[in-house]
Image: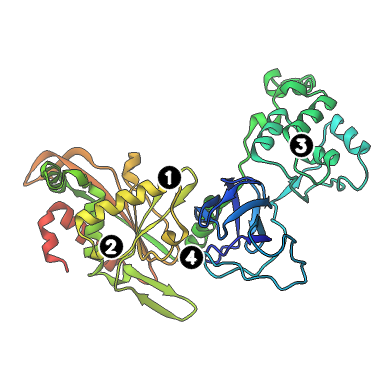
Amino acid sequence: MIAEFRLPDLGEGLTEAEVVQWLVAPGDAVTLNQTLAEVETAKAVVELPSPYAGTVSTLHADAGETVAVGAPLIAFDVEGETDEVPSPDAEEKAQPNLVGYGAAPTATGRPARRARRSTGARSAADTAVLEAAPHDAVPSASVEQVIERPRSTPPVRAHAKRLGIDLVLVAAAVGDRLITRNDVDAYAERTGSSHGEAPAAAPSAPGIPATAAALTPGERETRIPIRGVRKHTAAAMVASAFTAPHVTVFHTVDVTETMDLLAGLREDRALAAHRIGPLAVIAKVVCLALSRTPGLNAHWDEAAGEIVQFHYVDLGIAAATERGLIVPNIRDADRLSLVELSEALKSLAETARAGKTSPAELVGGTFSISNIGVFGVDAGTPILPPGQSGILAVGAVRRQPWEHRGEIALRQVMTLSLSFDHRLVDGAEGARFLKDVADVLEQPGRAMLLR
């Protein structure tokens, strides 16, 4: 029989996901829990395992399409009493709930396509095609009209863009089916843009360089759709910036003794494989210092009218990836040793770079660290992750002249930047926390005084 697999609830209120790539095709035999596809949510790229063993019958969405939670994603031909597709009125068999992907979805409907805006501007060739097309094939193109994006794959869209062809016009000829590369090429032949050559440019206006006038808008600018992690991060940062009153304080500290400590740890054969770095030490010190400033490890619950203080530290580490900024968390970081923190940071970074960070790893943080020093930056004013009351930016370690024991000497110096929510943390508390962190980095032995 035919079994439909609908996009499951990926958790944390996510309502849709974009198909990044299919790892199976119609006709393929799949096993239970075999990875079917990679989908991108607003937070991460996740792999979808198969809830059935059988043969792939239909892919309901193409790579690049956005699918609503609960919408049909893929169909399987599985062993059963009948090969007929159940009627829509028939009671559907409950879909297996995939572990880690939330409750079973109930929404139905076609895969949602991202809306695009039509500017209404068409070339002479485009206008001719529109006039020749059936009146019901292409909606009237008024300025700023929102229309549905034609069905196509990312390579086909890229090919059309290189030729300067609007896929809406190609869709007028092929209908609602998936647009192929051959369809784009056929349209290019009809309009004189074949073999990747755009129609001849009009003479340039007086005072405008010929090279500039010959460029098409696509050559003069690049438009990148706002979606996925970038879209989620932008919304979260705007919400945080205009909700929590941010205050940022700075402190420059001599970290020479900490760097000497790390050099000694690297020479220890028992620890050489762990490659403990400055960020691991700072993470450990932050966990110790938070116990003395609980307001920085808290959440302002507006709805309940309460301040929630956490008795654990889920430490967020800002990570720059090709898909945008993400802040995965190290759970119960305050219970980890320096070596364990170092390994957790290494695993977190590798997972983020590979784009494998799960949505569950991106929620629930109580305090965050942003290592801007890796980019050679000394200081900044970091924005609080939503729901958190503090974030520490760690600057680059630099050798520079510094007063040391009454004399000027070359020392290794770092600037710390702490942003905090002034509703929960007073200036004195923020300064005390920053001083606690700085004191231990200046003299690592002082960590024994914190608890």
**Whole-number angstrom distance, CA of label 4 to CA of label 3:** 42 Å
From the image, which quarter does the C terminus lie in?
Answer: bottom left
- Closest to the observer, 59 or 445: 59
Proximity of marks 4 and 2: CB atoms separated by less than 8 Å:
no
Mark 4 or 2, nearer chain start:
4
Instruction: Please determine whether, in this image, residue 258 is positioned above or below residue 13.
Output: above
Name the mark nearer the viewer: 4 or 2: 4
**Residue on which the image places disc 2:** 333
Residue at screen point 50% across, 57% down: 33
Q: Residue at x 65, y 30 (%)?
A: 220
Marks 2 and 3 sit apart, C-alpha to C-alpha, by 51 Å
Of tags 4 and 3, the one toward the viewer is 4
> What x and y, as percent, mark residue 89?
78, 71
Q: Nearer the viewer, mark 3 or mark 1?
A: 1
Q: Earlier in the sequence, mark 3 or mark 1?
A: 3
Q: Which residue is mark 4?
A: 99
Amino acid at the residue labelled 4? Val
Q: Is residue 21 left or right of residue 398?
A: right
Q: Is residue 165 above or below residue 76?
A: above
The residues bearing labels 2 and 1 have C-alpha atoms spaced at a distance of: 22 Å
- First in sequence, mark 1 or 4: give its number: 4
Dot 4: element: loop
**Residue 84 at x, y = what percent?**
75, 61
Q: Which mark is residue 385?
A: none
Badge 3 marks a residue whose secondary structure is loop
Q: Which residue is mark 3?
A: 166
The x and y percentages for residue 229 are 52, 52
Mark 2 or 3 closer to N-term?
3
User: Tag 3: residue type?
Assistant: Asp
Mark in the foreground, 2 or 1: 1
